[in-house]
Amino acid sequence: MTLKMNTATTILPVDDAARARSFYTEKLGLPHRGKTDDGSELLGTDGGPMLQLMPVSDGRHSEHTALSFEVTDIERTVREMEAMGVQFQDYDLPHLRTENHICTTDSEKCAWFMDTEHNILCVHESRNGQPEYQV
């Protein structure tokens, strides 16, 4: 058996599916694909990876990055997202420091933000010209 990641679905817990859908479609520009019987909102392109915003009643969310989007120009992406109202997190920790919202390591640049439901999201750019994660 072989699993295909190009049709995988990431499921994020949300307190308010309509509010979350608005953030992901209006602020991040993801296409809306519809709504499921359980009230989940589906986002993504036909035949590609999908994002499911699943309503939860317990308000529990991950304390780590739940989803990261690879970009080719992180500085431009951060500026454009800020212009759309996305607020980036800044860190000044011994192992994690940001400058202009961006953390730079030997292999990548990353910037973190939260959605309306307090899920931690990230945009990242490889510094070596290759996708950060290869199999």
Image (cartoon, rainbow, N blue to C red):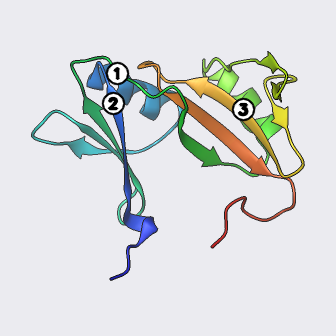
Of mark 1 and mark 3, the one earlier in the sequence is 1
Foreground: disc 1 or disc 2: 1
Q: Name the one closer to the observer, 20 or 57.
A: 57
Q: Secondary structure at mark 1?
A: loop
Estimate how packed mark 2 is, as few (under 14), some (14 to 19) or many (20 or more) residues with alpha carbons within 10 Å.
many
Q: Secondary structure at mark 2?
A: strand
Query: Which mark, by number, is residue 13?
Result: 2
Q: Name the one closer to the observer, 98 or 17.
A: 98
Write down the quadrant of residue 41 in the picture: top left
Q: CA distance from mark 1 to mark 3?
A: 23 Å
Q: Are marks 1 and 2 in contact (CB under 8 Å)?
A: yes
Q: Amino acid at mark 2?
A: Pro
Q: Does residue 93 lie above or below 76 as drawn?
A: above
Residue 40: image location, x then y, percent:
22, 36
Residue at the image position 28 percent from the left and 25 percent from the top: 17
Foreground: disc 1 or disc 3: 1
Residue of label 3: 111
